[in-house]
Amino acid sequence: MTHLELLEKTEYLKELIENGNTGAPKELARRLNISERSLSRLIRNLKEAHFPIIYSRTKQSYITEEF
């Protein structure tokens, strides 16, 4: 994945998370056309950059964590 592709996927992922519209991890990875492992790395990188992400089991979606 090129740096530009990574940036585009990360921005799209952030948008989906902010809208609470990611779906389950397997579905989200398929939407982004990446592996579940790559998705896990993107999520981890966003968390390390202090983007407030949690996975809501009731919504079956990644969402922004409210403090």
Image (cartoon, rainbow, N blue to C red):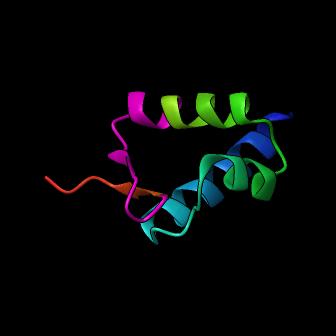
Residue 19 located left or right of residue 16: left
* Magenta highlight on residue 54: yes
Tell me the magenta residue range: 45-60
Q: Which residue of the protein is positioned furthest toward the front in this rendering?
A: 58
Looking at the picture, tell me which residue is in the foreground, 11 or 56. Answer: 56
In percent of the image, x 32 and y 46: which residue is there?
A: 52
* Magenta highlight on residue 56: yes
Q: Is residue 38 above or below residue 19?
A: above
In percent of the image, x 86 and y 33: which residue is there?
A: 1
How many labels, in total? Answer: 0
Q: Position of residue 48 (x, y in %)?
A: 40, 27
Residue 1 located left or right of residue 3: right
Q: Position of residue 7 (x, y in %)?
A: 69, 45
In percent of the image, x 61 and y 28: which residue is there?
A: 41
Q: Is residue 57 above or below residue 3?
A: below
In percent of the image, x 84 and y 49: which residue is there?
A: 33
Quadrant of the rendered structure where residue 42 is?
A: top right
Quadrant of the rendered structure where residue 58 is?
A: bottom left
Q: Position of residue 28 (x, y in %)?
A: 68, 54
Q: Position of residue 2 (x, y in %)?
A: 86, 34
Q: Is residue 22 above or below residue 3?
A: below
